[in-house]
Amino acid sequence: MLAIDKTNGGHLYRQVMDLVTSEVESGTLRPGDRLPSLRRMSAILGVSVPTVKQAYEELERQGRVRARPQSGFYVEAQRRNALVRGSGCREPVEVCCRSLVEQVYDAIHRPGVIPFGIANPSMARPAAKMLHRTMKRVMARAEERSLGYAPMLGDPGLRRQIAFRYLDLGGRVAPEDVIITNGGQEALALALQAVGRPGDVIAVESPTYSGILELIESLGMLAMEIETCPEEGVSLKALEKALDRQPVRACLFSSALNNPLGSLTSEEHRQGLVELLEARGVILIEDDVYGDLIFEDPRPKPAQFFARRSLVLTCGSFSKTAAPGYRIGWLLPGRFRDAVSKLKRSLSCSSGLLQQLTLSEFLSSGDYDRHLKALRPLLKCNAERMSARVARAFPPETRVSQPRGGAVLWLELPERIDSERLFKVAIESDISIAPGVIYAPEAGYRNFIRLSFGHPWSERLEQGIDRLGHLVNQVV
Amino acid sequence: MLAIDKTNGGHLYRQVMDLVTSEVESGTLRPGDRLPSLRRMSAILGVSVPTVKQAYEELERQGRVRARPQSGFYVEAQRRNALVRGSGCREPVEVCCRSLVEQVYDAIHRPGVIPFGIANPSMARPAAKMLHRTMKRVMARAEERSLGYAPMLGDPGLRRQIAFRYLDLGGRVAPEDVIITNGGQEALALALQAVGRPGDVIAVESPTYSGILELIESLGMLAMEIETCPEEGVSLKALEKALDRQPVRACLFSSALNNPLGSLTSEEHRQGLVELLEARGVILIEDDVYGDLIFEDPRPKPAQFFARRSLVLTCGSFSKTAAPGYRIGWLLPGRFRDAVSKLKRSLSCSSGLLQQLTLSEFLSSGDYDRHLKALRPLLKCNAERMSARVARAFPPETRVSQPRGGAVLWLELPERIDSERLFKVAIESDISIAPGVIYAPEAGYRNFIRLSFGHPWSERLEQGIDRLGHLVNQVV
């Protein structure tokens, strides 16, 4: 009964789910109300009775409705506590969370572990068949050429395909302005090194992705936390105040979808951000690796589209959407093209050719879009399933993010919980989680954890959530 | 007649070539002497007459003997001027050759160009069939797992295979001390960043690989040239003097085989080097990417084998030997394991998994060794062919290196030649070369060029040498 592939005929199924959800959210349907009968709903939406039944059962699995024998499906009371807002920004500091991050990554690769600790969205529905087929075709065609060095800045075909995608979003990017990197992490590293030096202050969202903080530490720079709202993204007011007080060299923010919050900024917000920064000559490095994994259209436009002075650098990647192990990302370098090119060549030479040729064909054939079209609703469904399960298994005070894309839930646990301790206890039960403290340069988010739903859903995962909830309750 | 595959039955063929060469070098055979008849040589070595004939014809192609009708093969006078020794060491300086390096790399990827400018030894005999077959097997077996993230420091199987190879050379390396990187260049970058900071002085051989100089520049460090002898490697006397005068943080030297000189150091030399450095607490980063491409056994031992204080870091790669486009190298970090691990994770995350799994199997199956066994004599033969052709086509004062491995010849042209100008003229004739100035931090080696013989040999390459010689003669 589990893991039904809702991408085949998922369209109609999703319609039923969405109608019920919106009626509940608007207050039309309240806890205790009876849902329209299967037959009635089938008539309302013009979908088959079995489809409605499947959707109702999924809602029941998620704990959002309950079936009463001989009667029908009834709306359940929901505990979905919204996250609390952050509290202003802080002084620039050296980052100090490295050894814990190492333990988190080590835990993921332990055999038999439930990997809630790693954000790996594409693994919810791996594109292995399509990508393997494409790669074999590339090998047969390019033969020994496919073993050779790629041009330093990337395969021209792939650079063109990436530029096309931006055009499709309404932005003009020349293929020569796409620099292929070893994954998104190298794109971030090159961007930071091109614009800053050791000692420079880099503004970051709070919370922000741990890899960004590690990078800032490795380069000897200082991280400055800026308050970030779970609904609207980084606070422009707080940012403006920070810029008044500190000589910030660059901001390193997520483009539109924050990790770990899963929050989505509005287009106006991004535009306002770029205007604020460019007016002061402050550089923006945007991490856009989750943009293609938004649950609902339209895909958010990168902040770079609003730049007038070419002070925005955009980092993208195929690691979250298609093939983490390919290590192929890219960087749109704004006005720092020369500096980035030299750094790329001297720090790691070119990136893998075979993977670039494969991805180029994967994009041009339309396979990538077909893959995303199937992956995104599945991730949305996983998010709902995990939220529902957490609501049942965790203490009632638990607050949970409502991700708009990506593959992670951000949980605020009761204050007494030390997430670092929870991480260690959980690993002993073969569950990997990511403790909140690694998402800020100083030890904030002590009672927060991040859980990934980027996996094929299974009873094993559900039991993992239950066991984790049990551990949290024990600790309390 | 060209491009006969001397790796099938190449053993006997090579025996004939080697006997003639050693007799000429020892002076037993002098210019004008007649070689033993085909029948006589066949009897001496116990090989077939056609094999002797094939070897004699190859010697003739290389201009080392000449056939006289109805008479036999006669030794030709050779112009093989040895390279001049370097001249002491210099003050530490900032590196300044970047835009020219960029032009050199751009030139390589121009369609229709003869790529003498890139050292790409494995392309002399690509292992495409073996590697493609292995990769397909890996895909079939690992399926979606092969798309996922590799562990941060590398696939355990590949790390073990690399450790085995060191064991085979007589050194003990734990698999956990092998850190997989994005090619040899990232290994060098991580090593330098782990041990040094901006402003540090790094000693380099003179001449040395341009990528090393670019890296030093990118990291804001200073390069200090140390005299390097075309026969014996870096001068320990000059190095000692330099250490007395300057606070050198680390030396970044080739392990045993210098690029561009192609010279091989003795084991005693490497041991003496490590003793000298460790006694003074100076770190050695060794670039060992050419060690497996030595023309004659035994493969040189890395300097790390002689370290007592773990102050030596060793950088290796499969880019020169098997698959440049895979971007898989490794680093033995000595006592800097923790620093290197953190840098690797934060600067580029893990390296490509599919390539690691493929190389792991390529090594364990014995295919890698079989491939090297076929590649090395072919490179040696290419070196001889190119030297011979250069001797005929270039001005008589030209001096040429006698590489002991790898894929490049280093040429000292008449003093009036400006190699940067020659590079630009050659590119207009669709020939890419590497001008000497990029192999030293300051503008030395003005009248030197580096030519790669890492290609399947062909008449087109020979004509390329002739045309290049013609251009040099014109410039003179």
Image (cartoon, coloured by chain):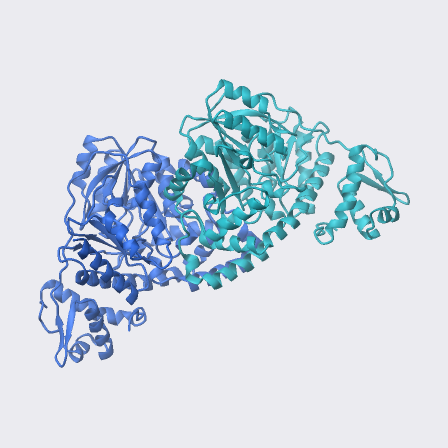
Chain colours: A blue, B cyan
- Relative to the observer, which residue lies in front, B297 or B475? B297
Residue A419 is left or right of residue B173, and the answer is: left
- Relative to the observer, which residue lies in front, B404 or A34? B404
Which residue ends up furthest to the right in the rendered image?
Answer: B70
Which residue ends up furthest to the bottom in the rendered image?
Answer: A70
- Residue B299 at x, y = what percent? 62, 41
- Residue B325 at x, y = what percent? 51, 49
Name the image quarter holding the N terminus of chain A: bottom left
- Residue B74 at x, y = what percent? 85, 39
- Residue A469 found in image quarter: bottom left
- Vertically, is A331 above or below A117? above
Q: Residue at x 15, y 65 (%)?
A: A22
- Relative to the observer, which residue lies in front, A23 or B142? B142
- Relative to the observer, which residue lies in front, A38 or A464? A464
- Vertically, is A189 above or below A83? above
Question: How many numbered discs, if any?
Answer: 0
- Residue B38 at x, y = what percent? 86, 47
Tell me if I can see residue B345 in this picture. yes
Tell me if I can see residue B206 in this picture. no
Residue B239 is left or right of residue B27, and the answer is: left
- Vertically, is A236 above or below B129? above
Residue A38 is left or right of residue A136, and the answer is: left
Q: Residue at x 50, y 51 (%)?
A: B158
